[in-house]
């Protein structure tokens, strides 16, 4: 068997229209009429699949899943988010694994943006 990437990410939401608009406006994920989007990876794009223990504090303990979106240019993404007034949960971090920032969607789900 050969895993080619994630087939989907699904979760429940309190306000479907609000959350669809937020993801479209903030992350440029255009949601279609079936309440989803197809994101087609490009060369150099990879998906990390990783487990965390129940008490790991990398992301909030009450949050079961955290999304990580790989971006082409984190500085441009930061400018876009600042223009929209999206607050940062974590400012830009530079590490051996790449550059990261954290934001939250309107329902408080932490989202990591990553440039490798």
Image: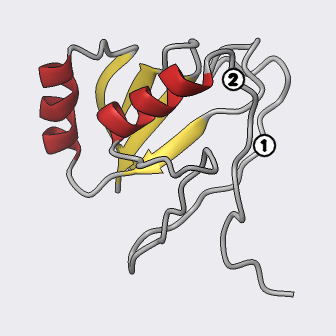
Report if residue 100 is visible in the image.
Answer: no
For the N terminus, give its image quadrant: bottom right
Report if residue 31 is visible in the image.
Answer: yes
Determine whether 84 is above or below 33 in the image: above
Question: Tag on residue 51?
Answer: 1
x and y percentages locating residue 83 in the rendered image: 12, 23
Q: What residue would you read off at disc 2? A: 13
Q: Quadrant of residue 65?
A: top right
Secondary structure of the residue carrying numbered label 2: loop
Count up the numbered dots: 2
x and y percentages locating residue 98 in the rendered image: 35, 49
Task: Please give left or right for residue 56 compared with residue 30 in the image.
Answer: right
Determine whether 99 is above or below 85 in the image: below
- Crowd class of label 2 (few under 14; some 14 to 19; many from 20; radius 10 Å): few
Of the pair 32 and 110, the residue shown nearer to us: 32
Determine whether 99 is above or below 112 in the image: below
**Residue that extends furthest to the bottom in the rendered view of this protein:** 1
Q: Closer to the camera: disc 1 or disc 2? A: 2
């Amino acid at each position: 068997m050969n895993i080619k990437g994630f087939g989907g990410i699904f979760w429940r939401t309190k306000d479907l229209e609000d959350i669809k608009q937020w993801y479209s406006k903030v992350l440029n994920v255009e949601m279609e009429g079936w309440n989803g989007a197809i994101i087609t990876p490009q060369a150099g794009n990879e998906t990390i699949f990783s487990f965390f223990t129940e008490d790991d504090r990398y992301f909030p303990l009450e949050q079961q899943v955290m999304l990580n979106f790989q971006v082409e240019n984190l500085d441009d993404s930061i400018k876009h988010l600042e223009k929209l007034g999206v607050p940062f949960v974590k400012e830009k971090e530079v590490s051996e694994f790449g550059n990261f920032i954290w934001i939250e969607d309107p329902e408080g789900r932490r989202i990591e943006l990553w440039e490798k």
